[in-house]
């Protein structure tokens, strides 16, 4: 462009009777206009627009319980194509309560009895009151000793602190089993070995030495897994004497399996409780730990246990979760639930909140991780629930989805969720229940642990993307129009002057790059922003529709300004007879007035284009 203007200047020299000083001044004017055009042609306001949009969005997201740790995550979330959500605390309220149970084979209780309203309240204590002292003690010790939760205060109120599953069991023990206090119960127990919870085997245990010298192993965890390790079950739970146990028959096992499934179909988390007595510790013939010969290898002794009972724990859905899931699905985002619960419980919860749809696939973590990549690719489009999953299963799921081109958002709260959160395009950790490791690995922290907040993050992410695209569309329209108008008018002018001066061009560039960026970057999202599919990773920054709008609007503006510039003198009846005298007197000529009119018309068209 500079070369073209320079050639025109050289072509103008032979017919120009101006002095060398005047010719130098004209050349300098051409240089200034050419450099200004280069400045105007570059949309240097784009970084400002992106920064403003992200800063504004992250500030507003914090008010909606989304603490953004990584700035780019806000923009990335707008294009998320799938969300792998945890269940407990995200889809549910994380307020767990024991509402049902089967102790032994003959005694069942439920807080959801179908008789009268009063019966719903009295069913549990009435059944528990029939238990013998030995049965209550066994159940109490299985819950209190085999637990990592403890007593404390939250917001000045007494509460059990720890895993919500364990705090629900401790609350049950306090309300119905006569627990005096966690610290007091544990102080009276001689603990020999602790077996921490393991996400692979889905259980935890503790070994205590009883006053009579017997060593007792308490185990609690996933009911269907523990049931497979039980060969006997307590009986005569109401007998005042120490109850005996009996061998589990096929019919007994089927009854207990049906009980687990019936609880799970009611969206209850089922927990099994086992125990086994030993005359010495470590047991004879058992493998011991390499670093401590006084500790037995748990996997070696975890068999032939005695079943104490199975309890069902209720964790109701959060209000608005079903609507939030529906919004995600309408927005083209696939929601998958990844949980450690068994298949039946996961299926019931997923169906209740709308994640599980017709034709959806449910799988267990151990089966999923054994699939080949080709088999995974065939399953993933319809996979909606991954039950009995470990953190490694979640990481494998996220990795494969990303390899298939998906933009993946993941929620997690535990230390073991760190790899999956780090691998995801957007990692959401829990602000309330989340560990520090999970928070450090995440991009966004959900301050209320609520799935609905993920939807708000997606809305703001799309608003940021829209702000950048709107600014680009607006800025490119301004640049194309300004550059072509200036260039054509300069080339067609006898003295090489442009209809838009360098000062006017810089003023337009300054105003349009700053105030326009500020205006377009602070638009709040509307619900309608979710009525479209996410933008693929491979999509161009400037879409075909944007190019249509840019080119169409630029053509319209150029037609109007060219008409005014080239035909304005005739249309408006201007005369050029007195131009020389007006210039000598330092006054504006009709051409100067027309140029001013062209400039104002150009500016107003940009303002209308911004609001359009």
Image (tube, grey):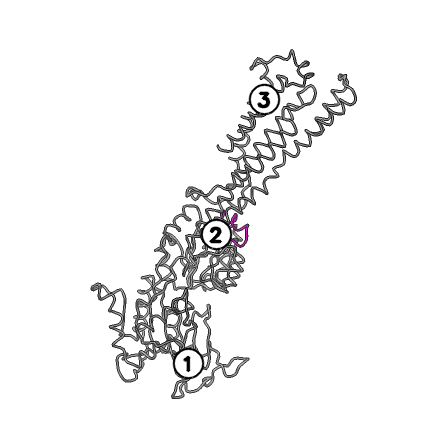
Q: Is residue 284 covered in magenta?
A: no
Farthest residue, direction bottom:
212
Q: Position of residue 97 (x, y in %)?
A: 34, 66
The residue segment tinted magenta is 66-79
Q: Give the answer, above or below, for where 377 lies relative to 24.
A: below
CA separation in Å, label 3 and label 2: 49 Å
Q: Give the answer, above or below, for where 528 lies relative to 103.
A: above
Q: Give the answer, above or below, for where 108 lies relative to 511.
A: below
Please report whichever mark, 3 or 2, sits nearer to the chain's N-terminal start: 2
Q: Is residue 73 covered in magenta?
A: yes
Q: Helix, strand or loop at disc 2?
A: helix
Label placed on residue 187: 1
Q: Which residue is mark 3?
A: 562
Q: Helix, strand or loop at disc 1?
A: helix
Please report whichever mark, 3 or 1, sits nearer to the chain's N-terminal start: 1
Q: Which residue is mark 2?
A: 62
Left or right: residue 583 compared with residue 149: right
Along the line of sight, which residue is nearer the eye, 233 or 142?
142
Tally of numbered discs: 3
Label placed on residue 536: none
Left or right: residue 507 compared with residue 176: right
Q: Position of residue 321 (x, y in %)?
A: 38, 53
CA separation in Å, label 1 and label 2: 44 Å
> Tag 1: Cα neighbours inside 10 Å, few (<14), some, or many (≥20)?
few
Tag in front: 3 or 2: 2
């Amino acid at each position: 462009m500079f070369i073209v203007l320079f050639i025109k200047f050289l072509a103008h020299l032979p017919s120009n009777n101006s002095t060398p000083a005047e010719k130098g001044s004209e050349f300098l004017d051409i240089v200034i206009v050419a450099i200004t055009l280069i400045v105007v042609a570059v949309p240097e306001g784009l970084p400002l627009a992106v920064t403003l949009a992200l800063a504004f969005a992250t500030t507003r997201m914090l008010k909606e319980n989304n603490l953004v740790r990584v700035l780019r995550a806000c923009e990335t979330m707008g294009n998320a194509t799938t969300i792998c959500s945890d269940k407990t605390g995200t889809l549910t309220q994380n307020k767990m309560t024991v509402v049902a149970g089967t102790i032994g084979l003959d005694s069942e209780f439920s807080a959801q009895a179908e008789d009268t309203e009063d019966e719903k309240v009295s069913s549990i204590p009435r059944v528990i009151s029939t238990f013998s002292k030995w049965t209550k003690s066994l159940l109490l010790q299985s819950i209190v000793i085999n637990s990592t939760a403890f007593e404390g205060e939250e917001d000045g109120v007494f509460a059990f602190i720890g895993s919500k599953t364990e705090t629900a069991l401790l609350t049950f023990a306090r309300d119905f089993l006569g627990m005096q206090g966690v610290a007091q119960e544990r102080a009276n127990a001689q603990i020999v070995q602790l077996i921490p919870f393991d996400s692979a085997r889905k259980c935890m245990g503790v070994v205590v030495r009883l006053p009579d010298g017997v060593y007792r192993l308490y185990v609690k965890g996933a009911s269907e897994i523990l049931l497979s390790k039980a060969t006997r079950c307590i009986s005569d739970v109401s007998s005042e004497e120490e109850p005996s146990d009996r061998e589990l028959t096929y019919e007994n096992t089927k009854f207990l399996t049906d009980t687990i499934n019936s609880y799970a179909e009611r969206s209850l988390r089922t927990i099994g409780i086992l125990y086994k007595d030993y005359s010495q510790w470590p047991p004879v013939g058992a493998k011991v730990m390499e670093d401590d010969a006084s500790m037995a290898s748990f996997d070696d002794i975890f068999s032939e246990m005695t079943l104490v009972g199975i309890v069902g724990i209720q964790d109701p859905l959060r209000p608005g979760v079903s609507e939030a899931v529906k919004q995600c699905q309408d927005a083209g985002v696939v929601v998958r639930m990844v949980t450690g619960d068994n298949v039946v419980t996961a299926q019931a919860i997923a169906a209740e909140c709308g994640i599980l749809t017709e034709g959806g696939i449910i799988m267990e973590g151990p089966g999923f991780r054994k699939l080949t990549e080709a088999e995974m690719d065939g399953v993933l489009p319809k996979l909606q629930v991954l039950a009995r999953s470990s953190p490694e299963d979640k990481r494998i799921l996220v990795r494969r989805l990303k390899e298939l081109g998906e933009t993946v958002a993941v929620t997690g709260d535990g230390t073991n969720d760190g790899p999956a959160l780090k691998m995801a395009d957007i990692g959401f950790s829990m602000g309330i229940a989340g560990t520090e490791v999970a928070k450090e690995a995440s991009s966004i922290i959900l301050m209320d642990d609520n799935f609905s907040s993920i939807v708000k993050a997606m809305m703001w992410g799309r608003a940021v993307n829209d702000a950048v695209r709107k600014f680009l569309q607006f800025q490119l329209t301004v640049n194309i129009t300004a550059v072509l108008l200036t260039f054509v008018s300069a080339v067609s002018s006898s003295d090489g002057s442009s209809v838009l001066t360098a000062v006017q061009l810089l003023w337009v560039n300054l105003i349009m790059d700053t105030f326009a960026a500020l205006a377009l970057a602070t638009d709040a999202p509307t619900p309608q922003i979710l009525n479209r599919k996410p933008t693929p990773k491979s999509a161009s920054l400037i879409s075909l529709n944007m190019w249509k709008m840019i080119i169409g609007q630029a053509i319209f503006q150029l037609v109007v300004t060219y008409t005014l510039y080239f035909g304005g003198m005739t249309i408006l009846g201007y005369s050029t007879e007195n131009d020389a005298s007006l210039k000598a007197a330092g006054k504006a000529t009709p051409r100067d007035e027309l140029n001013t009119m062209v400039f104002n018309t150009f500016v107003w068209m940009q303002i209308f284009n911004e609001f359009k």
